[in-house]
Image (cartoon, helix red, strand yellow):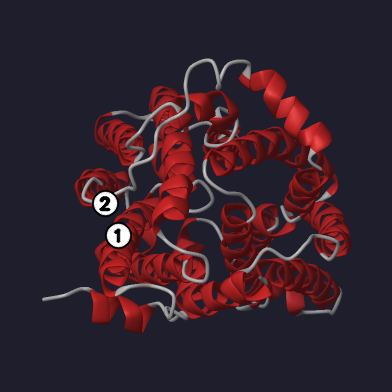
Amino acid sequence: MSLTPVYQRLVRADRSDQSREEQREVAANGSRQILAEALQATGDQVVNAKTVLPWLFASLGVPAGLTGLLVPIRESGSMLPQAALAPWVERTKRRRHLWGLGAAGQALGAAGMAGAAATLQGLVAGVVILVALAVFSLSRALTSLAGKDVLGRTIPKGERGQINGLTTVLSGAVAITLGLGIRLLGGDGAGADVLAWLLAIAAALWVLALLVFLGIREPDEEPATPEETAGWAGRAVQLLREDRGFRRFVVARSLLLVSALSPPFVVALAAHAGGGGLAGLGPFVIAQGVAGLIGGKTFGRLADRSSRDLMVWGAAAATVVIVGFLLLLRIPGMPSAWWLYPLTYLVLALTHTAVRVARKTYVVDMAEDDQRTEYVAVANTAMGVLLLVAGAISGGLALFGPEVALLFLGLLGLAGVVVSRTLPEVSRHDH
């Protein structure tokens, strides 16, 4: 059975300039990327530093201080090494092999977490899981870099955002199933044994994703030479200094962290009000899944029309939600309303889905060939540093209360709206 009709129903685009052979090849490559990325996104719902892993730490009796390291290790670890990895990617002819290597590393990391969850307790369990998470995160840096490059080499503009969106939809459906499954398998008292099994399954999913992705057919292009890729650090600084459009994108993306950093503070406020903690994990996991299910495909199509505009609206929506949430908390009786927190988390997750799909599509569309690899790598490395800075500031402000940190992130989002509006259009419809 040909994948072309199925793919073209899922991913709508003007293909008048593509031959039948090109359409078949794009459909085959696109289908494999959707499936592989969906398997990876499914595993991500289990190896989640904002929900599942903190729950696991609580189940194992890990000291609370280590819980605060989960999100920085997960997010920054996958971004910081990318500028250093970019020359390796550019010198590699078949970049799907590097994606496979990164997927294998993620499988190893997830398996290590599963083993620790099944056999260890307390401080030792926490340290081992953090080390495994670091392996996982560094491996993710490679799949992130190679995956965007393969997407840009094998899928034309106008279809890339929809592929990112479809992946989000599929992972959202899995998150809903996972949230419901946690409740059914263990109820409010689901223990580490259940989570250990889930982590083991996640490791197997990355192995399957590896096998699927290796079937992608890349164009025959000569890789860069060692001489051409030397001095990556200097070139990264030069790119940020001299490429005005790219530098503006990095600034805009850093300000869009509002949608990524604000949800944990909503969870913290829910726990303080008695609506969070272990008993409240299910609704937040389900909310995250609903956001992906609702927003993934829609935001994918909007990103193909104008990824810049989607970033603007995503940042604006996140700011409005945060301000509205803080105002509602000032109303007597509202802080004890259990539904307020998962609902706010859901809307913030929707805005983050929009921003994430938009920025991924924007950076792939704004560059060509090996320039794309360099753009993605330098942008992510810069974001790894900025994420640590923004996380440290918001975390420090949280000492005065989560509300103060949320107010700071809301102001960050407002600035993100202003800067994102100055970005040039890069979507297919403007050429």
Q: Which of 422 and 177 is in front in this view?
A: 422
Q: Find numbered disc 2 in the image and state the secondary structure of the residue it sits on.
A: loop
The answer to whether residue 327 is left or right of residue 104 is right
Disc 2 marks which residue?
Answer: 216
Q: Which of 365 and 182 is in front in this view?
A: 365
Identify the mark nearer the N-term, 1 or 2. 1
Q: Quadrant of residue 4?
A: bottom left
Name the amino acid, label 1: Asn
Q: How far apart are marks 1 and 2 (CA)?
A: 5 Å
User: Could you say where residue 198 lies in the image, as x and y percent from the top left?
Assistant: 27, 51
Q: Find numbered disc 1 in the image and state the secondary structure of the residue it sits on.
A: helix
Residue drawn where x is 47% and y is 43% of the image:
144
Disc 1 marks which residue?
Answer: 29
Q: From where the camera sits, is residue 55 visible?
A: no
- Crowding around mark 1 (Cα neighbors within 10 Å: few <14, some 14 to 19, many 20+) is many
The answer to whether residue 99 is left or right of residue 118 is right
The answer to whether residue 40 is left or right of residue 241 is left
Quadrant where the image shows the C terminus: bottom right
- Crowding around mark 2 (Cα neighbors within 10 Å: few <14, some 14 to 19, many 20+) is many
**Marks 1,2: beta carbons within 8 A:** yes
Quadrant where the image shows the N terminus: bottom left
User: Could you say where residue 104 lies in the image, as x and y percent from the top left?
Assistant: 28, 35
Name the amino acid, label 2: Ile
Q: Nearer the viewer, residue 88 or 381?
A: 88
User: Could you say where residue 60 lies in the image, as x and y percent from the top left?
Assistant: 39, 37
Residue drawn where x is 46% and y is 79% of the image:
13
User: Could you say where residue 59 lies in the image, as x and y percent from the top left?
Assistant: 40, 44
